[in-house]
Structure formats: C-alpha cells, structure tokens
Amino acid sequence: MQPSPQALAQTGPVIQVRIELPAALSESLRLAGQLIPNPVDGIALIDTGATITSIHAPILVTLGINPVGVATVGTAGGPQQQSTYPVRLSFPGTPLPGFELPQAIGCDLTGQVVLGQRPLVGLIGRDVLSQAVLVYNGSAGMFSLSF
C-alpha cells in the first residue's frame, strides 16, 4: 500500500496484533491437560491518548481470561470503571517483540472499523509505547514503531 497523508490521517497508525493467553495461564492449562484457546489476530490502533492498552472485551471472554482488577478510565462520556485482564500481545509478521501485559483494559470496540471495514481489536496504549520509539510522519503518510 502506498503511503498517503490522507489515509494515515483518516485511519491512524494501525498495526497487526495477536492477542493470546499470558504464558502463566497457558502453562497452567497445559499442566491441567486442558485445551489452550487459539490466539486472536486483528488490527489495533496505536493510541497515544490511552494510558493502558485496551482489548475488545469479547475477545478476552472468548480466550477465557478472567479479570484481575478494575481501573477507572477517562472516556468522552466521563470516567468509567473497566475490568483489567492479563494478556500476551504480539505483532505477527514483524520483528517487534511480544509483551506480557499484567493489566489490559477490557473495552467495547463494537463498530470501530478500519482498512476496508476490518474491526479494531485493541488500542495500543502508552504502557506499551513507553518501551518503544514511535515516529509519526503525517506529511509523508507513514509511521514507524520500534522497540
């Protein structure tokens, strides 16, 4: 796809992600002889306005991940309480490392679509970006993310 300032401004910086069980939970299921759910692949938006990475809550339910806490998050409608979940987040098809996140926000991204109606599965927040270099070159219509 050719870089385009208009396309980047419209869609934002998005990246392919894989959401899966954290290693400790996978190992616990393996030792108990239980099936480990398949990871979920999708598109995430890099969101410098998000303090904590957020994952579409139905994905977390599908993976069988239980909440580990609650966080108060600021939204356009005011503060809200959201459950937090441990997850493993990786970036298939890239050399970027994966991350074990002890707390990701479970959120509702229903209806949020990009790139020809592909649903968003998450928002990459500053908890992940704090370990990265993000360069957003709006005039060239491209961005880069490195760790």
Image (cartoon, rainbow, N blue to C red):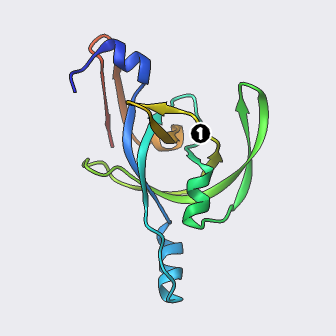
Residue drawn at point x = 48 percent, y = 70 percent:
37
Quadrant position of residue 137: top left
Where 41 sits versus 62, above or below? Answer: above
Between residues 96 and 110, which one lies in front from this camera angle? Answer: 110
Q: Residue at x 64, y 49 (%)?
A: 106
Where residue 76 appears, as percent x and y from the top left, is 71, 24
Q: How many marks?
A: 1
- 18 or 72: which is nearer to us? 18
Horizontal side of 100 relative to 145 (left or right) equals right
Tell which residue pokes out farthest to the front in this image.
117
Q: Is residue 6 visible?
A: yes
Residue at image coords 25%, 49%: 93
Residue 108 x, y percent position in the rendering? 64, 42
- Relative depth, front residue between 38 and 53: 38
In the rendered structure, which amino acid carries the disc numbered 1?
Leu
Question: In this rendering, would 116 be left or right of 31?
Answer: left
At 50% from the left and 66% from the top, the residue drawn is 22
Q: Is residue 127 above or below residue 89?
A: above
Q: In the image, residue 11 lies at what x, y percent?
A: 42, 24
Q: Looking at the figure, which quarter contains the C terminus?
A: top left
What residue did someone put label 1 on? 109
Mark 1 is surrounded, within 10 Å at the Cα level, by few (under 14), some (14 to 19) or many (20 or more) other residues, namely: some
Judge whether residue 138 can be spotted in this image: no
For this view, does 35 lie left or right of residue 134? right
Q: Nearer the viewer, residue 99 or 30?
A: 30
Image position, residue 3 (x, y; %)? 24, 20
As helix, strand or loop, the secondary structure at mark 1 comes to loop
| Whether residue 21 is situated above or below residue 137 in the rendered picture | below
Rendered-image quadrant of the N terminus: top left
